[in-house]
Amino acid sequence: MIINQDRKKFELRKRSLVIDLDGNCGSTRGLGVGTDWLGTFEVLLGDQEPEDVIVTTDAAEGTDLPKNVDLLPARRNLEDFENEYRKRNKFADPTNTLAPALKKLAGKYDFIFLDTAPNASAPTIAAYRTAQWFILSTEASKLSVDGLNDALTDIVAVREAGNATLRLLGVVMCKVDSRTRIASSYVDRIKREFAAAGELGAFNTLITRATALEHAQSQGKTLFQTDPGHKVAEQFRDLAREVLARLDTAAKVSGEVGGSVQTEPKPIVKEAANA
């Protein structure tokens, strides 16, 4: 996680793991890692231990990830995971395969981010069943925002199906054109609709549209690596501060009502809800 302090770059030294559970390999490609590595497909099948296939910054391997960030990468074969799993385990449930891997990683990271596909594939459902928190991202457009209702329905269904503690941490508004008023109208709509459902709504921080982000992505880097002083990098720092504040508030409320505050890594589903 990154936070802004007196406009200087300051790292919180929180160790994070990104688990790419999307066959499109967005996190894997976005972090500049090729799609020929062993990763989530093999871990979910039980062929590999997660610790053995996690990618870290390694000059010899040609990998350069952001500081304190590791990656469990994906390949396109993840799309065929469920078929392959059922060939080997005819009567077993492929959506219960992520929990054992997360248990083995307990205590190694401060945060574990589960990057899922928008469709309800087996890896996506497995993420829903194991996560503590849900982060949604959306663009300021009608189709994208309308898709959030489907995601909210999924969260409610997962609670009823066994993960009763899954909660929405917030909605990130991305690629916002700050010159228009439409972003504010969509933020207000999200706050109203999610509040009515008893959920946390939009984060206050908006991520504005910037060609610098596309430039960074084309290089397989994050904006913190290519242009750490950019205004959008500052917005992401503000967003990280909001995330930490909401988690801190939730932990305090849990303690006040007599609940246990979990000290294990916090698995967080991050899903794009674009239609």
Image (cartoon, rainbow, N blue to C red):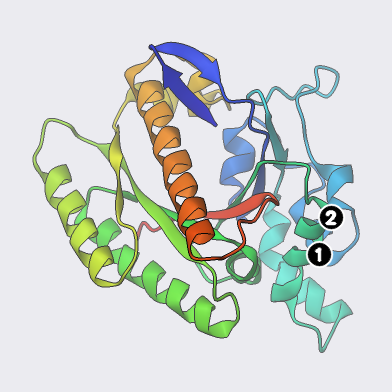
The mark total stands at 2
Residue type, label 1: Pro
Q: Which residue is mark 1?
A: 100
Residue that appears at 38% across and 12% down: 7
As drawn, 235 above or below 252: above
Residue type, label 2: Lys
* Residue 271 visible in the displayed image: no
x, y (%) of residue 188?
16, 53
Residue that appears at 14% across and 44% down: 184
Quarter that holds the C terminus: bottom left
Q: Identify the image quadrant of residue 232.
A: top left
Task: Determine whether label 1 and label 2 are within 8 Å by CB.
Answer: yes
CA neighbours of label 1 inside 10 A, class few (<14), some (14 to 19), many (20+): some
Which of 40 and 152 lies nearest the eye of the viewer?
152
Which of 49 and 168 lies nearest the eye of the viewer?
168
Which of 135 and 116 lies nearest the eye of the viewer?
135
Q: Give the farthest residue toward the bottom.
A: 91
CA neighbours of label 2 inside 10 A, class few (<14), some (14 to 19), many (20+): few
Q: Secondary structure at mark 2?
A: helix
Q: Which residue is mark 2?
A: 104
Q: Secondary structure at mark 1?
A: helix
